[in-house]
Structure formats: C-alpha cells, structure tokens
Amino acid sequence: MEDHEATVKNRAEELKALAGAKRAVMDATGGGESLVYSTTSFLQLSGGEKASRVWLANFEVVNFLRRLAHAQQSTELFQLAGRISNAMQLAATAGNSDPLAKVKGLISDMIERLMNEAREEASHKAFCDKEYGETKQKLDELKYDIEKYTSKLDKAKSDSMTLKDEVATRQSETAKIIKSQAEADKLRGEEYKIYVQSKADLEQGLSGVRLALKILHEYYSNQASLAQQAPDAPVLHSAAQGAGGGIIAMLEVIESDFGKSLASTEMTEDAAATAYQRLSMDNKLAKKVKEQDVEFKTKAAAGLDKAATEFAADLDSMQTELDAVLEYYAKIRAMCEIKPLTYEERAA
C-alpha cells in the first residue's frame, strides 16, 4: 500500500506539473503567440525582428517552465523545458508559423501517457486489493482452523491417554481382585478340609466317650440292681462303685469338652463360610464394575483415537492448502508490491 501510494503521489505531482506547464504556455504566451506568429506581422517584420521575437517567446516559456520545474523539483519539467527550447528554435529556423503548437502537443501527449498509466495503475491496484483481501481472509481462516484442529487433536490424544491409563489401572485392580479371590478360594478350601477332619474326629471321639459312658452306666446300674434283688447271695466279685463313679465323672467332663469343641468348630466354620461368601460377593461385584468400566473406557479411547486420526488428516489437508495459499500470496506480493520508480527514475 505504501509503495502504491508513493507511485500515485509521484504521478499526481507530475500531472500537476505538466498541467501547470500547459496552462502556463497557453496563458502566458497566448498574446505573444498572436503577435510573434501572426502572418501579417511576420510579413511586415524583417528577419532580425522575427528572430528576436521568436527568441523572446522561447526565453519566456522556457524560463517559466524552469521556474516551475525548480518549484516542483521536477526533472521531467527541466527536460521538457529543454525540449521546448530546441523545438522552438528548430521551428523558428525552419520558418514554422506556429512552433508553440509543437510544444502544446508534447505536453498533451505526456499528460495523456501519464493518465493512461494512472488508469492502468488503478486497475492493477483494484486487482491487487481484491486478491490481497481474499487471500488474507483465506489465510486467516486456515490459520484459525489449523489452530482449532490442533487444539482438538491435542485434547483427543490427551483424553485418550488418560482413558488408557485408567483402563490399565482398572485392569490391574481387576487382576488383584482375581488373585485375592483365588487366594480366598484356596484358603477356604483348606479351612473347610480342616473343619471336616476336625468335625469327624470330634464326633468320633464324642461318640466313643458316650458309648463308654453308656456301657459303664449300664454295668454299674445292673450291679446295683442285682445286689438289691439278692442281698444274701454269696458275693463272688464286688464292683468298685467308687472308682467307677470317678471314671464316669471324668468321661462326662471329656464328653462336655468334646461337645464344646465340636460346637466351637461348627461356629468357626459357619463364620468362615459367611465371611468367604461375603468376600466372594464383594469381589464379584467389584470385578464386574471394573470390567464394565474397562469396556466403556476402551471404547471411548478407541473413539478418541479415531477422531485424532481424522483431525490429523484434516490438519495435513489444511496445511497443504495453507502452503499453497502462502505460495500464491508470495506471488501476489511480488506482483503487487513492486517498488515504485521515483519521479527522477521515470523521467530518466
């Protein structure tokens, strides 16, 4: 834009200078031209007078243009003054009746050329402004889209990584639950095996003690009954009632201890079985929840990975388009941002 404005400014100054020169020629020399170049005057004047008047008109016009060129700092006008001086001298020497017509023609041609250049420049500027505007808008849109899709791609990758980490954690926790349940199953199996054996031993022992008590109770009871029925019968063997009573008492204590041990063993088994069932149920529920979480997050991570792949493809496409637009933008700049020629360079 600055280069174009400089070009327009230089051309405007040049057109202003040329218009001033043309106006100066027409206004300042109109009367002199009729006097100097009038047919009657030339017929009545001697050759010396004709040459003197031609020189005078030349001098006035050329000096005016040089003063104007100096004021405008215009090399073009300095050169034009020189060409006008030469043209007028040649016209006077050749006997041309109107040498200023040549001058006016030169100025008019130059003004027309500059006006044509101005129109071409305006058309070129309109083209450049349009291409600049559309290209800049496209660049802004692509840069915005690339930034947006880059952010989406980064977020998709980050979210996918987070989900995969959570899946790995859930899988590790599930593995621990499975291991814990396996250990509980093994321990419960061992506990139940011991319980079965202990119960069998206690029941067998309790059965034996009870059988012994039954036998002793029956024996001593029969002996007492016989003694009461035949008190005078000769005594062949006397039952040791006191010792037998002690044995029975001892067996009854043993029976009680066995019974308590059996009851305690069964209570312990019931508690262990209940705890095992509760632990198994909790592990089963926790395992199911974590497996569902793994399934859901695995699908979500796969969806994010797919989206990330699509975002990456879109970014590649956008980057390719951006590179093409940037290349075109560089060409437009080379075409439209040509450094303007200075007034002196165009006049040279």
Image (cartoon, rainbow, N blue to C red):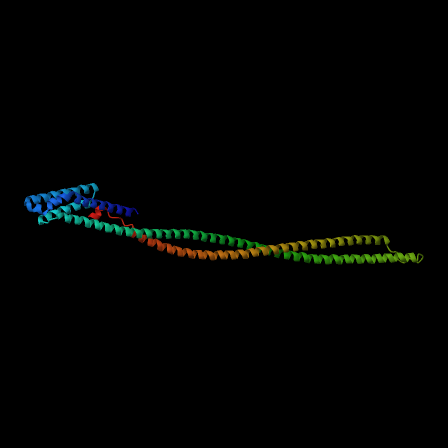
Q: Is residue 71 visible?
A: yes
Task: In this rendered view, identify the residue nearer to me: 104 or 87.
Answer: 104
217 relative to 176 in the view: left or right: right
Q: Position of residue 97 (x, y in %)?
A: 11, 49
Determine the residue located farthest toward the right in the rendered image.
232
Q: Nearer the viewer, residue 131 or 45?
A: 45
Decide which of 326, 32 is in the foreground and name it.
32
Q: Is residue 299 left or right of residue 242?
A: left
Q: In the figure, residue 220 lies in which quadrant?
A: bottom right
Residue 58 shown left or right of residue 231 in the figure: left
Q: Measuring 84% from the left and 56% from the top, which residue is drawn there? A: 217
> Which residue occupies the extreme front position in the image?
40
Vertical relation: 73 (above or below) 154: above
**Which quadrant of the structure image shows residue 241?**
bottom right
> Picture coordinates of residue 21 (x, y %)?
19, 44
Number of numbered callouts drawn = 0
At x 60% / y 54%, what residue is drawn?
Answer: 286
Residue placed furthest toward the left: 46
Q: Quadrant of residue 291?
A: bottom right
Residue 180 visible in rendering: no
x and y percentages locating residue 246 in the rendered image: 82, 52
Q: Position of residue 33 (x, y in %)?
A: 13, 45
